[in-house]
Amino acid sequence: MSTPQHAGDQKATTHTPTALVAFAWALVGVPLAYGLYNTVKAASALFGG
Amino acid sequence: MAVPSFLARERIIARPGFNRWLIPPAALAVHLCIGQAYATSVYKAALVSHFESSLTAIGIIFSIAIVMLGLSAAVFGTWVDKNGPRAAMFTAACFWSAGFLVGALGISTEQLWLVYLGYGVLGGIGLGIGYISPVSTLIKWFPDRPGLATGMAIMGFGGGALIASPLSRQLMNWYDPTYDGTVGTTPTGAAVAQLFVTLGLVYLVFMMFGAFIVRVPAPDWRPDGFDPSAVKAKSLVTTENVSANNAIKTPQFWLLWTVLFCNVTAGIGILEQAAPMIQDFFRNGETSTVVAATAAGFVGLLSLFNMAGRFVWSTTSDYIGRKPIYMVYLGVGLVLYVLLATVGSTATWVFVILAAIIISFYGGGFATVPAYLRDLFGTYQVGAIHGRLLTAWAAAGIAGPLIINGVLDARGTPGQLTAGDYRPALFIMVGLLAVGFIANLMIKPVAEKWFEPKNTDAPTTASTTGDRSLSR
C-alpha cells in the first residue's frame, strides 16, 4: 500500500528516495517524541502521589 | 489571486511512482508548528507582568487568534483549494512567522496592540490557512483511508502544544537564567520577545520544508488495489461532488456544524478549567487533596489523550463509518459527562479516566470531520467546505469558556469551589451533547440537485507544466 500506482498517465515515472521519506518522518517524529517524553514526564506526577 | 509559478498547483502534480507516505510528514510539519497556539499559557503570566496588564487583556491575544483562525479558514478555503497545498502552506508559514516577529516587536516596545496585531491577527490568519492547507490533499492521496490521513495531520495540531510547552520553557530559561520553569518564577518580557523571534524563525523553516515536499496526486491517480465502488457502497458516502457555495445551502452542512460546535464546546468545558477543576473536585475545606504538581500532570495527561484521540478515533472511523463514530463521541460522551457530574468526585482515578476519555472524543471530533465532509460532499472543494465549518470551532471557543466561567462565577470564588459547583455547567454540556447527538442522527445523504456536473473534478485537472520539481 505504501507505493501507489498511477493509472493511465503517459508521463515518465518517478522514484521517491526511501531516505527522503525516512528523513521527512524523522524531522517530524523527533520533535514529537521530545514533546511526548516531556508530557509523559509531567503526567507521571499524577500517578506518583 | 494568482500565485508565483513555483507555488502553483500545476507545478506539484506528482508523477507516477511518487510515494504518498511523504505527504503526512509534510502535513505534520505545518500542524506541529501551528499547534503552538495551545501552548500560550507558558508565557501568559510573563506577559501580564511585562505589560502590567490583566489575564483577560493577555487572554485576548489567544482569542483573536482563534477567531481569525475560523474566519480565515472560511474566507480563504476556496483560494486554498484552487491554488493547492504548497501555496497555502507557504502563505501560512509567512503569516505564522510574521505573527511571532511582529508580536516580539510589540513585547520589546511594550505596545500590546502590536501583539494583538501580530500573534492575534497575522498569526491567526496563518493558523486558519495552515490548518486547512493539507487536509484536502491528504484526502485525495488516501481515498482508501481518509480518516487515518486527516487523523495523522490533525493529531499534529495537538502534538504541537506538547512540543512548544517544554521547548518554550527551555528557551526562556536560556534567555533569562533566573527563570527555571517552576511555579513561582516568571521570565522577563525580553526573554519572551526572544522566544517569539526564535519560534518565528524555526517555524518558518519547518513549515517551508512541508511546503516544498508536498505534492498533489494526478486527477486519475488511485492507490494500488483501491476500488472506489467499495467506498461508495458504505452509507452516506458519495462519489459525487458539491461546491463549497452549494454545500453551505444544505441542511447536512449545518447539522454537521451543530455537531462540531456541540462536541467542541463540551470538550472546552473541561480543557478550559482542567487544573483548577481536578483540585476543586477533591477539595476538603480550604485545601485540596490534589496538589498543584498533580494538577499539572492531569493537564499533561489530557494533552496526550487529546492528541491520541485525534489519530485513534479518526482511524477507527474508516472502519465503522463517520456517523457511528460521532454517535460514540456524542452519545458515550454524554454518559461520561453525567458520570463525571455524579460520581466524578468519588475517587481521583475515576475523575481522571472519565475526563481523559471525554477529551479523546473532543480531539477525535476535530480529526474525523474532514473525512465526514468528504463522505457527504466529495473531494471537489472539501478544503473550502472544511474552512467554512471551522467557524463552529471559533463559536465554540467563545461559548465553551463563557458557559463554564459564567456558571463558576455565579457559584463562588476560585479556590473555594467544590465538585457540586461544577454540576450545572456539566449538565449544560450534557444538554449540548444531546443536541449534537440528535443533529448527527438527522444527517442524510446530500440531495442530487446540489451535485456538480459529472465532468467536474478536483482542481487538480489543471494542465501540467514543465517538469522542474526534484522528486515529483
Image (cartoon, grey):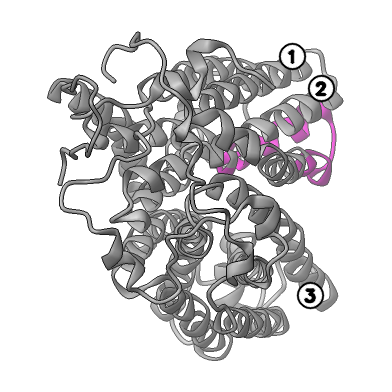
| Number of numbered discs visible in the structure rendering | 3
Q: Residues within 10 Å of mark 2 (few under 14, many from 20)?
A: some
- Amino acid beneath label 2: Leu
Q: Give x and y (percent) for residue B47.
A: 73, 31
Residue B368 in the figure: left or right of residue B195: left
| CA separation in Å, label 1 and label 2 | 7 Å
Foreground residue among B340 and B348: B340
In the shown orientation, is residue B87 left or right of residue B214? right
Q: Which residue is mark 2?
A: B114
Compute the Cα span from label 3 to label 2.
Answer: 33 Å
In this rendered view, identify the residue nearer to me: B364 or B224: B224
- Residue beneath disc 1: B105
Label 3 to label 1, Cα distance in Å? 38 Å
The residue positioned 48% from the left and 66% from the top of the image is: B359
Q: Are marks 1 and 2 in contact (CB under 8 Å)?
A: yes
Q: Is the magenta region chiefly helix, strand or loop?
A: helix
Residue bearing mark 3: B407
